[in-house]
Image: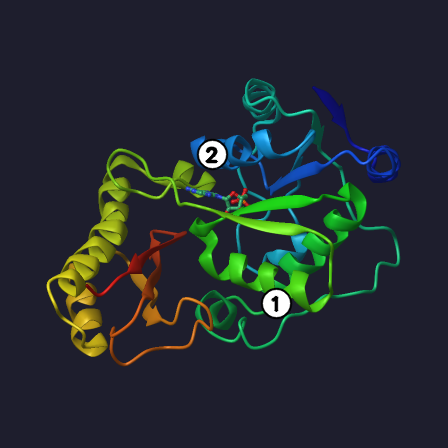
Amino acid sequence: MHIMADPHAVQLDALKRRARAESIGFVPTMGFLHSGHRSLMDLVRPRCDHLVVSIYVNPLQFCPGEDLDEYPRDPEGDAELCSGAGVDLLFMPETLYEPGHASTVSVSGLTDGLCGARRPGHFDGVTTVVSRLFGLVQPTLAVFGEKDYQQLAVIRRMTRDLALPVEIIGAPLVRDTDGLALSSRNKYLSADQRIQAQSLSQTLFAIQAAVAAGNRDVRALLALGRTSLNVDRIDYLEIVDPDSLQPMDRVDRPARALVAAFVGQTRLIDNVALCPA
Ligand code: AMP
């Protein structure tokens, strides 16, 4: 496995590979890698000649007051995980933007609600960094986790709208044995907070079970969910159309339940598919 930091050297290498008709698989991350990230690598590894993972804590997608400076880092552990996953190139830039960087990629509509409404500018930061990474890494396919369900929808939209020649693959959400969605931010949780954090997935599973049992009324389902969330602050709990991300009144077709909540200072997100029988 090669480790590179220079964006231009990465782009040069990628362009040479593409000229030789090699396929390039890409997993963009912010590091502090866990089994959720590993599952993305495992998904794309058999589907490409050359597998690239990037680690970059992108300042553009953090809002003022968020955890940019404290975001957990473990470059040695990350390199070990990537090497074990058969990654060919680990791209770890110091910075990704050139002095004078002045362009923003912005997706409207899909970014209006959910995390977009609570984290102003976050998705502009995500789409700007992902489009720049696509330009540098030149992937033929890139994988994003359903853990960040809205992000996946926004990236799919951006890729279509800008006619970027990259196949986007969505990867299922990976959970710990206690149901908690794996996240680099789980490191912030104390033992007690971890118990509280489990209530996110428990709430979503309760909503899922209620839908499977025939409950179709979104207001009733969300009321049920709010009573079972044991968190310090609910950012949102919503049931939306899985493609448009627009709120629904009744779960009379497939839907997605999504939650964002604070446990202490830590903001956690989770989501599940809702499938009426
Ligand atoms: P991050 O490092 O948090 O920016 O995540 C990098 C990629 O890994 C994103 O596409 C995430 O959606 C994905 N990811 C993070 N956690 C999980 C998880 N628990 N299950 C599946 N994918 C995940």
Q: Is residue 173 visible?
A: yes
Q: Is mark 2 within 8 Å of ligand 1?
A: yes
Q: Name the residue carrying label 2.
A: 39
| Quadrant containing the N terminus in the rendered view | top right
Residue 70: x, y in percent? 54, 42
| Quadrant containing the C terminus in the rendered view | bottom left
Residue 222: x, y in percent? 22, 70
Image point (72%, 66%), residue name: 105
On screen, residue 187 versus residue 127, left or right, reads: left
- Name the secondary structure under disc 1: loop
Residue 246: x, y in percent? 42, 77
Image point (28%, 47%), residue name: 197
Q: Is residue 77 above or below residue 205?
A: above
Image point (89%, 36%), residue name: 12
On screen, residue 186 versus residue 26, left or right, reads: left
* Residue at the extreme front of the image, as rendered: 21
Q: Name the residue carrying label 1.
A: 121
Say which label, 1 or 2, has the lower sequence index: 2
Please tell me in which quadrant of the rendered image residue 9 appears: top right
Q: Is residue 12 above or below residue 160?
A: above
Nearer-the-camera pick, 71 or 113: 113
Residue type, label 2: Ser
The CA span between labels 1 and 2 is 28 Å
Nearer-the-camera pick, 74 or 190: 74
